[in-house]
Amino acid sequence: MTVHPHWFLPTGGDGRTLVDRHAYSGNILDRSRRPSGVRAPDIEYLAQIAKAAEQLGFEAVLTPTGTWCEDAWLTTVALAQHTERLKFLVAFRPGVISPTLAAQMAATYQRVTRGRLLLNVVTGGDSAEQRRFGDHVGHDERYARTDEFLSVVRGVWSGRPFDFEGAHYQVEGGLTALPPDPLPEIFFGGSSAAAGPVAARHADVYLTWGETPAQVKEKTDWIRALAEREGRTVRFGIRLHTISRDSSAEAWSTANRLLDDLDADTVAAAQTALGRSESVGQQRMLALHGGSREDLEISPNLWAGVGLVRGGAGTALVGSHAEVADRIEEYHALGIEHFVLSGYPHLEEAYWFGEGVIPVLASRGLLSSPAPGGTSAGAASTDGTTAGGAAGGVPLFVAGGR
């Protein structure tokens, strides 16, 4: 079992603060009025990140889904034309698209990109966001619908006419004439009692947000046991941010700078909004810090400061390159194979991790292939450090995100 490193595409906007820059908020798309340090999610910038991720040794990039960001399918198929090997972990919501159409789209995507599609199924934990898509189904019922959705998708991929009769979908002769080759791996997350059985029946990779190692073990043990009852084996992944530097002091200085950029009103407003989420995973993220700036290092090198203002993944690995590699190795020992990572800004942090941590992981025999590049400024030294520079801070813009 090896480590599979992945990165993130900020299709809602990017910048040098912890708050997300939404694609359709304020004037982010107007360069003349955009605040300094804020980056729109245009194809040129996203292509820079995608190319960097490919060159640095990341296997795939996760693209989010929602009304606050660009469409994941269209954006990534465009970026596939700018890259050669990089895979795209496309997030989508089952309730707003036909499962037969989704199966067909995935098959076409695989042919267009020559097999570079991974699927991230997002059932949805925010009713307000779901209603923006015209979806008024309740939390647990959404997971029941996802269960049926994925049953249809896998059935349609068989290459033979497929019938299905369920509470949410009725399909007669569903067919993808040319099934995807290879079949896209399905990544799936969810911490609620309603989510677990769906993951056990359908997920190739169960994806959790970055909780402490003890909490992650508890969750993976839960899913593993459910999958065994279904006669299946599920692999595991984790979603984290990273702040990796040449020294631990530099990394924590960067984390503290990000925290210093946040005023009390911004944190309070974000916590109020996030507290309304129906997502059990989101509530678990909030419980890691309780809205307080104190004691944010909840486990060695695991910092919960991101979750003060950001929805979804709210923790970061902070430390020297060797320390961050240590924490990845710790999670890996629990059975975590896929590490879906990100940082602010995403372009620079991709280089910090790719040039600093990936060579350390490679030297420990944790990667399936040698890290890219040679013994340049980005190569790891014996203590896992590299040379590089850091970006400065800018004022806050918009709170929210995933």
Image (tube, grey):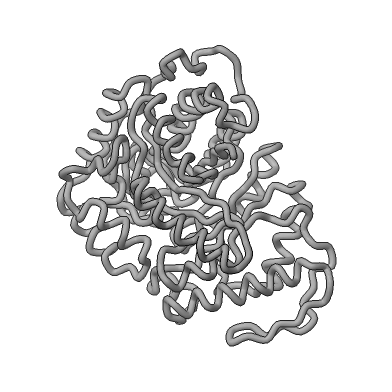
Specify whether 117 is left or right of 126: right
Vertical relation: 170 (above or below) 82: below
Front one among 224 and 387? 224
Q: Quadrant of the C terminus?
A: bottom left
Front one among 275 and 158? 158
Vertical relation: 289 (above or below) 374: below
Query: In this view of the protein, can residue 112 be seen by the observer?
Result: yes
Residue 95 sits in which quadrant? bottom right
Residue drawn at point x = 58 percent, y = 38 percent: 50
Residue drawn at point x = 50 percent, y = 74 percent: 143
Residue drawn at point x = 37 percent, y = 44 percent: 34
Specify whether 96 is left or right of 388: right
The image position of residue 63, as x and y in percent, is 53, 51
Query: In this view of the protein, can residue 72 be seen by the observer?
Result: no
Vertical relation: 243 (above or below) 130: above
Count the marks: how many?
0
Front one among 50 and 356? 356
Residue drawn at point x = 71 percent, y = 37 percent: 84
The image position of residue 33, as x and y in percent, is 36, 45
Residue 36 sits in which quadrant? top left
Q: Quadrant of the N terminus?
A: top right
The image position of residue 100, as x and y in percent, is 71, 73
